[in-house]
């Protein structure tokens, strides 16, 4: 049970890290925040519409966050992967 | 010269008349973020095969990469068939500031998928998301109001606004299906609807935006959506 919990947490952390890397790769950073705040009416309306579609604000916010879920680009994944240890005897 | 039709039906006749309920839906679209909305007869929904081919020749970057973009989706014949089963449609538009939709490097950002520092691409995505949500809310509201089956069409592809950070369209590439089936829908143009002509019939000004368009050269852009309803 405990091991399962730890495994789940590890999986969640990996997902979160993947998200952060993906956001950075697609240049979605805090630099754009002032420009997004300028269009706050649009984003508020979207949130209200999501809440109405889903039936509750919490589910609406969940949908909102799911838009920003992602995976790192394949090239970076390959870069992050450790090269095989050739020196190690098989 | 265009033939007169029952395009802008704003009938306030009998309360039990179907148009009264549809008028309620039109007003609802305005409260949910649409800038203009009209009720049109489905005779005024113009389906032209050339519009659908425009997505494929020359090939749009999303053509074939999204389950809701050509060559996937309905054929022009199917769209004509679907439209013919409806009597009315709610046609709405969301105006987009030219500084966003015709921003200097917006095409580069859209093609590469890498957002610009000025946030224009993200804000443009927000406008597209709003159109998708209005379509879905109209469908939901119509179902609650007792209208039968409805059919909604939004603007642009659904992959960029909803699954931008995903490597592929899950609906196409995996067995999991669409990530946002409750939000995504086909766009009007991918189904061959001639949005420009329909907007002109509704009396809305249109400014086509090309790759070399400068923000100062156009007053604004528009994103449009359509929901077919049957009383």
Image (spheres, coloured by chain):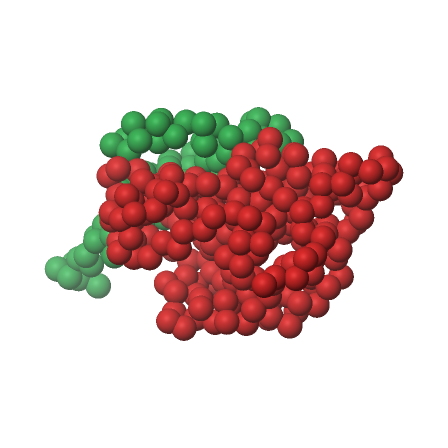
Chain colours: A green, B red
Residue B115 is left or right of residue B205, and the answer is: left
| Residue at 39%, 55% in the rendered image | B208
The percent coordinates of residue B47 (x first, y second) are 60, 66
Q: Residue furthest front?
A: B1
Q: How many marks?
A: 0
Residue B202 is left or right of residue B163, and the answer is: right
Q: Nearer the viewer, residue A31 or B105?
A: B105
Q: Residue furthest left?
A: A87
Q: Nearer the viewer, residue B15 or B204?
A: B204
Residue A69 visible to an observer of this rendering:
no
Quarter of the image where one finds residue A59: top right
Residue B22 is left or right of residue B102, and the answer is: right
The percent coordinates of residue B118 (x first, y second) are 26, 37
The percent coordinates of residue A46 (x first, y second) are 51, 34
| Residue at 28%, 33% in the rendered image | A32
The percent coordinates of residue B151 (x first, y second) are 67, 53
Residue B49 is left or right of residue A78, and the answer is: right
Q: Nearer the viewer, residue B110 or B212?
A: B212
| Residue at 85%, 35% in the rendered image | B15
Q: Quadrant of the C terminus of chain A?
A: bottom left
Residue B198 visible to an observer of this rendering:
yes
């Amino acid at each position: 049970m405990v091991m399962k919990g730890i495994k789940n947490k590890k999986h969640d952390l990996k997902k979160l890290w993947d998200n952060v890397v993906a956001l950075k790769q697609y240049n979605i950073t805090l630099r754009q925040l002032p420009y997004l705040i300028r269009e706050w009416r649009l984003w508020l309306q979207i949130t209200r519409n999501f809440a109405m579609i889903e039936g509750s604000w919490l589910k609406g916010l969940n949908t909102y966050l799911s838009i920003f879920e992602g995976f790192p680009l394949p090239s970076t994944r390959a870069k992050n992967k450790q090269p095989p240890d050739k020196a190690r005897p098989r | 010269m265009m033939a007169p039709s029952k395009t802008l039906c704003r009938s306030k006749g009998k309360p039990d008349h179907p148009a009264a309920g549809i008028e309620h839906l039109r007003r609802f679209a305005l409260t949910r973020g649409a800038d203009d909305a009209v009720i049109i007869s489905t005779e005024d929904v113009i389906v032209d095969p050339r519009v659908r081919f425009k997505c494929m020749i020359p090939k749009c970057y999303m053509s074939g990469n999204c389950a809701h973009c050509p060559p996937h989706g309905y054929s022009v014949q199917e769209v004509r068939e679907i439209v013919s089963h409806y009597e009315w449609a709610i046609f709405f538009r969301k105006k987009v500031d030219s500084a966003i939709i015709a921003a200097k490097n917006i095409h580069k950002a859209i093609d590469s998928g890498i957002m610009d520092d000025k946030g224009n691409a993200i804000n443009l995505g927000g406008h597209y998301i709003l159109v998708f949500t209005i379509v879905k809310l109209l469908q939901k509201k119509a179902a609650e109001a007792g209208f039968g089956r409805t059919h909604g069409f939004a603007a642009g592809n659904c992959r960029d606004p909803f699954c931008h950070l995903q490597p592929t369209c899950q609906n196409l590439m995996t067995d999991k299906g669409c990530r946002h089936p409750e939000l995504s829908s086909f766009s009007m143009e991918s189904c061959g609807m001639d949005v420009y002509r329909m907007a002109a019939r509704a009396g809305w000004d249109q400014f086509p935006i090309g790759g070399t368009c400068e923000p100062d050269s156009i007053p604004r852009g528009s994103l449009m959506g359509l929901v077919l309803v049957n009383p």
